[in-house]
Image: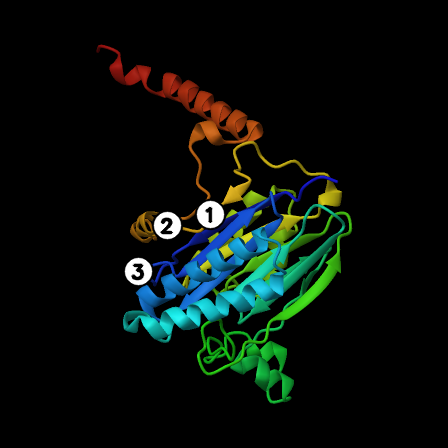
């Protein structure tokens, strides 16, 4: 069976000076990870990168997804205790595993989410958050929850030293045409589910849709770091774009700095030679029309009296 095609990206947003999100995808082991760090500019980066590294390395060795996340939690706790400059750091995680078969699994801690797209958008994960507790207790409706002032308060995260971590986990089975969306709260905190659904419901590549999701989150305010993966069912038979590396690493410190400096520019912009053939054709036709118009309009101005 074919591998899953996918698109993804991350952006520092419009308000933050650094990107504390980390993400990684590797088709060779069928693993996609998004981690949202907490604990300040330095601690958040360390926590999310540690989470990504630990989970990836353990899954590569055959460790189950849930056990790999628990190991990452312990590693972050120990690092936090041993290094006062990052004490109290933590990270959310949402992890997706699919080896190209009809089955997949999702595991998560915190409020980074996974959604299923199957002609409509369904959230697969349940946030470990204060607002979700209010919903569960009947004190808040799901409609009232979106944009709640305490929506960033989470009840579980990797690295919480006073808690035994509880990893939520589910299994699913692919159907033709389905997609899985993974994202940090920088996306779902800016866009309602209906807005996310409208963007996914387009005849575009996964990468183009991922770019548009990030762009719209930025247009809505971009108050937090934004990270996204959109993964298509291997049953759909899509082929990955040749320009898309099968392995996406988490951001290095240099890449984070570059992203912070370019935080006001939207992702997904391409050079003219990277455009699809229809768009390139349209660009050429537009240029020719402009040239003809100039040739008609300008000569009288240069004619001698």
Badge 1: few (under 14), some or many (20 or more) residues near its Cα, within 10 Å? some
Q: Earlier in the sequence, mark 3 or mark 1?
A: 3
The location of residue 110, given as percent across then percent down, is: 53, 72
With respect to residue 73, does 298 lie above or below? above
Q: Disc 3 designates what residue? A: 17
Q: CB under 8 Å between callouts 1 and 2? A: yes
The residue lying at 37 percent from left, 72 percent from top is 80
- Pick out the residue farthest to the front: 61
The location of residue 74, given as percent across then percent down, is: 48, 70
The residue lying at 59 percent from left, 76 percent from top is 166
Instruction: Name the image quarter holding residue 3.
Output: top right
Q: Earlier in the sequence, mark 3 or mark 2?
A: 3
Q: Which mark is residue 252?
A: 2
Task: Measure the C-alpha gap from mark 3 to mark 2.
Answer: 15 Å
Q: Disc 1 designates what residue? A: 249
> In the depicted view, which residue is nearer to us: 166 or 108?
166
Front disc: 3 or 2? 2
Task: Measure the C-alpha gap from mark 3 to mark 1.
Answer: 21 Å
């Amino acid at each position: 069976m074919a591998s899953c095609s996918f698109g993804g990206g991350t952006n520092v947003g419009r308000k933050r000076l650094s990107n504390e999100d980390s993400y990684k995808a590797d088709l060779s082991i069928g693993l996609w990870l998004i981690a949202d760090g907490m604990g300040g500019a330095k601690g958040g980066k360390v926590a999310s990168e540690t989470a990504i590294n630990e989970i990836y390395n353990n899954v590569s060795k055959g460790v189950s997804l849930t056990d790999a996340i628990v190991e990452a939690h312990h590693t972050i706790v120990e690092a936090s205790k041993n290094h006062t400059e990052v004490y109290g750091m933590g990270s959310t995680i949402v992890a997706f595993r699919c080896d190209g078969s009809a089955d997949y699994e999702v595991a998560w801690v915190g409020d980074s989410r996974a959604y299923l797209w199957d002609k409509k958008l369904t959230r697969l994960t349940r946030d470990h958050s204060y607002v979700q507790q209010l919903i569960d207790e009947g004190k808040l409706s799901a409609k009232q929850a979106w944009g709640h002032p305490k929506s960033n308060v989470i009840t579980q995260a990797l690295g919480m030293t006073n808690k035994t971590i509880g990893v939520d986990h589910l299994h699913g089975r692919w159907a033709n045409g389905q997609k899985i969306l993974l994202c940090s709260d920088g996306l779902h905190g800016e866009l309602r589910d209906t807005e996310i659904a409208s963007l996914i419901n387009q005849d575009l590549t996964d990468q183009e849709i991922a770019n548009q999701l990030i762009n719209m989150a930025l247009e809505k305010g971009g108050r937090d770091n934004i990270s996204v993966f959109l993964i298509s069912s291997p049953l759909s038979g899509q082929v990955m774009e040749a320009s898309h590396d099968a392995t996406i690493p988490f951001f290095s410190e240099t890449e984070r700095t570059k992203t912070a400096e370019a935080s006001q520019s939207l992702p997904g912009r391409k050079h003219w030679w990277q455009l699809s053939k229809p768009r390139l054709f349209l660009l050429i036709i537009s240029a020719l029309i402009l040239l003809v118009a100039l040739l008609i309009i300008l000569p009288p101005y240069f004619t001698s009296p």
